Amino acid sequence: MSESTVAPAPKIGFVSLGCPKALTDSELILTQLRAEGYETSKTFAGADLVIVNTCGFIDDAVKESLDTIGEALAENGRVIVTGCLGAKAGHATDNLIREVHPSVLAVTGPHATQEVMDAVHQHVPKPHDPFVDLVPEARGIAGIKLTPKHYAYLKISEGCNHRCSFCIIPSMRGDLVSRPIGDVLGEARALFESGVKELLVISQDTSAYGVDVKYRTGFWDGRPVKTRMLDLVATLGEIAKGYGAWVRLHYVYPYPHVDEVLPLMAEGLILPYLDVPFQHAHPDVLKRMKRPANGEKNMERIARWREVCPEIVIRSTFIAGFPGETEAEFQTLLDFMEEARIDRAGCFAYSPVEGASANALEGAVPDAVREERRARFMAVAERVSAAKLASRVGATMQVLVDSAPAMGRKGGVGRSYADAPEIDGTVRLLPPQKASKTLKVGDFVKARIVAAEGHDLVAMAL
């Protein structure tokens, strides 16, 4: 009797570049690949085909994406490209990627899982057609995640209705499309059931969730829930409470209705943390940016937020050296930082993005001045942040453990409610004083803050 041989499953190399929203696109593609029996390769050379998920937001991201595609082509030769850069026009053609790398097998835009899979099937036929879930790494209906097991991103919508003059994301990702609220809540519960202790809510504009569907009523667990930010966040908080988990909000525009979420933070249902992209504070600069707010109203709103929830931590990003920005307008931004006391702030020196309407504005600020203003902004931001961190010394905080070598006997690294992964600071946990005390990744521990170091805190687990 001859033994039948099973052909090895085809291997797909995968690179995910860009923001958490691109990461969630990658997770969807990887989940589908594994469901259809493909395996993933850790190297380009060892793969039957390589997929590169690109970013096209700023020039540095475009260069990184094009370089990665070139590297994959050199080492493998069979490359499918997806993501934001896939929707970007070239100098002489309607597609930049094909203009620079004409030998790629296929190019798609962002959130195009089926298009990517169609291209994969064309060049590397799928090994089987499953009838049931065959994805061992999947977290139930939430699929495969590329984050550590104890935290995950939850994308609630795609696209954006704003037309900020410095941004080309709507041209690549389209207008706002909110996910059905039942699907979002179902994925959230699957993630909590899989062991996720921190859920990070992301989108291009979290505050606008449901605008495109006129806040229609959906259903989850047999009960009606409106497709609206407040209803979504309240329900996420209720679900998380049953698992002792955190819910953290990102990309929140400072619309008036965001005030409604603050009581949920004050009562502990969701983390008292808001990631709000203010971008600037001077009304004329914000007008040129075509931002949906102004600095004076933002200052009033922040004050109200802190009245309702004194523990709130606000993170934001800003742009220095935007076209037409005068020294007086920049000083307004510095004054805003001092008065608003933003807990976590990042700043970019303005960089022209091909296709952005801001490129046509008069009064381009010289590169050296942009960088000098960015440095001055960061000096103020770091001074504010240092004072905020120093005020926490002596306090007891809940810390989510991210790293714990040797079961934490040598200490570890974690984060408090004030620290989102990758972008904020950390809490360095000292070696426990008791030999019996251990730390485990994904666990919450109570810790006493003993010092502040730069952007981070130092603590002793209790």
Image (tube, rainbow, N blue to C red):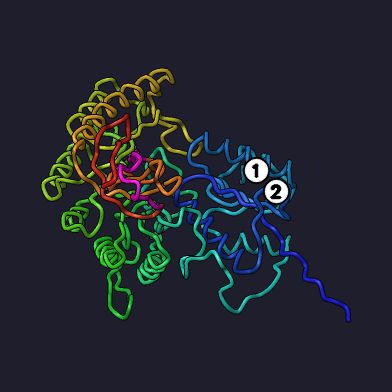
Question: What span is colored magenta in the figure?
Answer: 424-440
Relative to residue 115, is residue 393 drawn left or right?
A: left
Q: Between residue 441 and residue 431, name the one nearer to us.
A: 431
Residue at point 62%, 39% (across, down): 66
User: Element type at marker 1?
Assistant: helix
Mark 1 and mark 2 lie on one chain; the one further toward the N terminus is 1
Q: Residue furthest left?
A: 307
**Where is residue 28 drawn, in percent x and y?**
52, 61
Residue at point 28%, 29% (across, down): 381
User: Element type at marker 2?
Assistant: loop
Crowding near pointer 2: few (<14 within 10 Å), some, many (20+)? Answer: some
Give residue 115's mark.
none
Relative to residue 454, is residue 256 drawn left or right?
A: left
Kindly tell me whether residue 288 is visible in this rendering.
no
Which residue, given by chain and number where applicable, does mark 1 sit on? 69
On screen, residue 354 above or below 248: above
**Where is residue 31 drawn, in percent x and y?**
55, 63
Q: Is residue 317 magenta?
A: no
Q: Between residue 27 and residue 283, name the one nearer to us.
A: 27
Q: Between residue 137 and residue 204, name the one nearer to us.
A: 137
Q: Are the residues tagged 1 and 2 within 8 Å (C-beta)?
A: yes
Number of dots carrying numbers: 2
Residue at point 25%, 57% (across, down): 270
Crowding near pointer 1: few (<14 within 10 Å), some, many (20+)? Answer: many
On screen, residue 409 above or below 266: above
Give residue 104's mark.
2
**Where is residue 415 drawn, in percent x and y?**
33, 45
